[in-house]
Structure formats: structure tokens, C-alpha cells
Image (tube, rainbow, N blue to C red):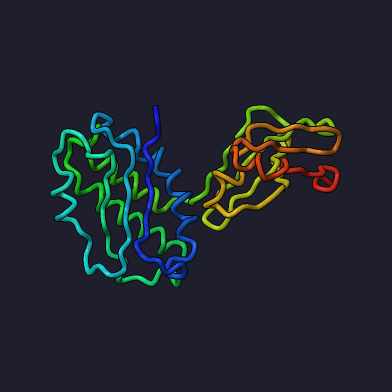
Amino acid sequence: MRNIWFTIYSSTKDDGKYLGLNNYRTLLELLLIPAVQDKINREKKIQKIMLSLFPELETDQVDNFKNNYFDRKVVNGGIINLEVSSKAIDWNVLSEQERKDFLIDKWKILFNNLSDDYFLTDKSEVIASLEELKHNEWRIINSPFKKKVKYNKESYSVVIDITTQRAQLALSRDSDERYYPLKAYETCKIETDANFKNFKLEGDTLSFNYKNIFNTMFEAPAVFNLNEIIK
């Protein structure tokens, strides 16, 4: 089943207004899938649920939101969008926890103002999942491959370690879970820059081939010398 896309849009063209927001958006998209997606009624034909941040708005546009989505058989165009005010905050000076609180509180407003027929569970379970997410560490460690890297009689998992600050391609040694960082990426670009379809180990050279056609057209495989990395 296709994932619902949870995303955040900023109305301002000022690139310096929300520094790092793209990283939060990318990570939160991944966190909301297990936290919320299975509680949403798929019969509504929802494809994307989004928050739109407007620094010029005095208040969140809840009344318009209800008029557009309350008790509808299906969602027009598959998109649910709540326009929210960010006038009261200066994103760039907020701590990480304050940023998490702000974003999750806005998501809670969105889901609180959908009618009950949008949910497979009681709406309070969705709100509780969001509140729990607010207090969890925002970090995801995924292994893009089931296949292990076998090097010098040791076995390693390939992992991508994602936080709001960066995404890191690394090897995790199975015997002691020691991390060996390979390369850091901007979190918001992992789906393009770290989108690998497979890897190959030849001697000390570990190479990753890109899945994305645009990467394969313009970039050579990502190559690492394990003799220099694993000491």
C-alpha cells in the first residue's frame, strides 16, 4: 500500500526565514508514517496531508479547513492542507525541542479538526501518538540493504542514520555495533543523494551504485576505501 505523504510547505520566499526546516520536514515525513498512517481511513483517498506555514497569518485557518474537509466522502485531489500561522515564533532562534513542539502542535490542530470518519481508531489515539513523538528522539536508522558487507572476517550492515542535523551513510559492525561513518548528507537530500540500489566490495574498495537515473547520468558510484576507514 502506498504511503501517505506527510509534508510541510512554507509560503515565504525568504530562504533565511526557516533555516533547517527542510531537514525537519524530511525526517518528520518518515516519522509520521508509522505513528499515524495506519490510523487514517484509506477510503477517503488521501494521498498527501500537509501543513502550510504562513508568517503573515494572525491565526491558524481552522474554519476554512473544516469547511473544506469536514465529513467529506473523499478528499478532493487527495490533498488535505491546513494553513497555519507562524507569526508568533522566530524559527531560527528556537531550540530543537521548541521546533519539535511547534510542528507537532500544528499537526495536532490539523488532526483534531478532521471529523471522526477520517480515522480507523478513536481520534485521541492519533493525538496521543503525536504527543509521544514530540518527546521521542527524532532519529531514524535504516538499513537500505539486507545483504551484509563481509570484510576482513567481519560482517557489517550498511545503515543510513538520519537526524534533523544530517543523514549519515555508515557501516555498523555486527559483532559490537561499532559505527564507521562513510559520508554525511543533508537530511533533506537523502532521497536523491543517497538513493542507492546496490553495493559492491572488491578488495578494500566498497562502491555504491545509484538508483536514481539523474545520479547515474552525472555521477560515478560512491566509492570508499575500507582499509582507510576501518582501523
On the rendered structure, is 109 left or right of 95? left
Rendered location of residue 107, percent (x, y): 31, 52
**At 70% from the left edge and 37% from the top edge, which residue is drawn?**
208
Q: Tell me if 215 is positioned left or right of 88 in this view.
A: right
**Could you say where residue 70 lies in the image, as x and y percent from the top left?**
15, 43
Q: In the rendered view, does 200 fall on the left or right side of 121?
A: right
Vertical order, 134 against 191 (above or below)? below
- Residue reaching furthest to the front: 217
Q: What residue is at 20 percent from the left and 59 percent from the top?
A: 61
Q: Quadrant of the N terminus?
A: top left
Q: How many marks?
A: 0
Tell me which residue sits at (32%, 45%) in the image. Answer: 49
Q: Nearer the viewer, residue 8 or 151?
A: 8
Q: Position of residue 78 (x, y in %)?
A: 28, 38
Say whether residue 27 is left or right of residue 114: right
Q: Is residue 154 above or below residue 68?
A: above
Q: Residue at x 58, y 54 (%)?
A: 186
Give above or below for 102 relative to 3. Answer: below
Report x, y in % for residue 163: 54, 52
Instruction: Tell me where residue 52 sits by quadrant.
Output: bottom left
Give the quadrant of residue 128.
top left
- Residue nearest the observer in this picture, 163 or 207: 207
Instruction: Tell me the quarter of the picture where residue 206 sits.
Output: top right
